[in-house]
Amino acid sequence: MAERIQTYGPAAALLALVAVFAVLSPQFRTLGNLQNLLDAGAVLAVVTIGATYVLILGCIDLSAAGVMGACALAVSLLVANSRTALDLGPLGVLLVVALGAAFGCLSGVLSVGLKVPSFMTTLGVSAIGLGVATVLFAGVQPTVSDPWLLQWASGRWLGFTRLTYLALATVALAWLVQRYTRLGRYALAIGGGEDILRLSGIRVGRYKVAAFTLAGACYGLAAVMITAQLGSGIVQAGAGLSFAAITAAVVGGTQLAGGRGGVAHSMVGVLILTVLANGLVLIGVSPYAQRAVQGVIVVFAVGATLWPLRHRLEVVK
């Protein structure tokens, strides 16, 4: 019974939320609102993919805020902008995603090499990222003038922004990696029993570093998306997204203990949080009450997911 709740509970909760808000607000049922929902959840979806690959290891990655801050400033200075003469266009975007991957690799190497709990090393990497972002900011906010990048946020096809399609493509690719590659299979296996896998001759450390690297690349891509939306680079580009991404993943059924869940589960969690925020606004709930309602629902969902695993969660890796 508990396993069924963990497997189907998040999807049932999502359907229940949709049904409730559809009844309470006619505007919720419109095509325009569906477009708003998917557009609003695009960045969170990409960040959550990164967090998910680390969570299924049984680790926690808190570096998103710092990595995204550094990457947001970097991309705003590498494409056409108001502060430098650089105009690398798409190459600048690829370099920034690589920068995010480098931060992720650093997190993984520190965690595996020093054998320190990942939440500590990733907090340190986040601080490094914020420091880099502050140096790049240099007291003057760079404004992006690259039409190619800005059109990804403003251009629409079939009513959805290009960033939404980019997020959907990233989700599909991440799911394929989890389902059909060694990284995806071993990441789940590591979360389920790291010692057993190590005794089987698998180089666990290598795959853990690879998962952190993939997470960093996702944070870099998300920073590019936010910069395209805002039209400028800001240090706080990823503020609050580490918590939001981990919350979405766990609410969707990806376990903090590792070994269970994945991209599909986490995307259900992203939809739950996005629908909840959107629906509360449409039915006129005050911003202060929204936070309380969201908090109660998140705590309940996380508790329901983790209660069967309470004996496994005594130590955070």
Image (cartoon, helix red, strand yellow):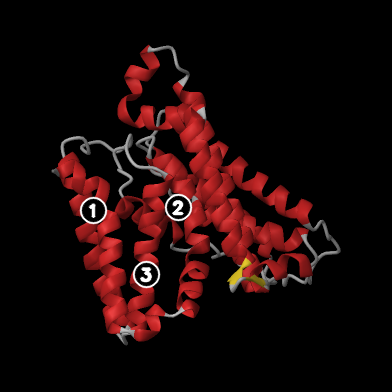
Q: Mark 2 points at which residue?
A: 48
Residue 71: image quadrant is bottom right
Q: Is residue 247 above or below residue 172?
A: below
Give x and y (percent) for residue 79. Answer: 78, 61
Task: Please indicate whether residue 69 sits to the left or right of residue 94 in the image.
Answer: left
Residue at the image position 30 percent from the left and 43 percent from the top: 255
Residue at the limit of the structure toward the right, as seen here:
85
Which circle's residue, 3 or 2, is located before the other in the chain? Answer: 2
Q: Alpha-carbon neighbours of circle 1 within 10 Å: few (<14), some, or many (≥20)? A: some
Q: Quadrant of the C terminus?
A: top left
Q: Distance between the residues labelled 3 and 1?
A: 16 Å
- The N terminus - image quarter: top left
Give left or right: position of 17 versus 49. Answer: left
What distance separates the C-alpha of mark 1 from that of mark 2? 19 Å
- What amino acid is labelled 3 in the image? Val
Label 1 sits on what residue type?
A: Gly
In this rendered view, identify the residue nearer to me: 6 or 113: 6
Q: Nearer the viewer, mark 3 or mark 2?
A: 3
Number of the label disc, if any, that sits on residue 69: none
Pick whichever of labels 3 and 1 is earlier in the sequence.
Answer: 1
User: What is the number of callouts on the image?
Assistant: 3
Residue, disc 1 = 9
**Chain-order first, disc 1 or disc 2:** 1
Residue 192, percent across and down? 31, 29
Q: Do labels 3 and 1 touch, CB within 8 Å?
A: no
Q: Position of residue 179 (x, y in %)?
A: 46, 35
Residue where numbered disc 3 is placed: 275
Mark 2 surroundings: few (<14), some (14-19) or many (≥20) residues within 10 A: many
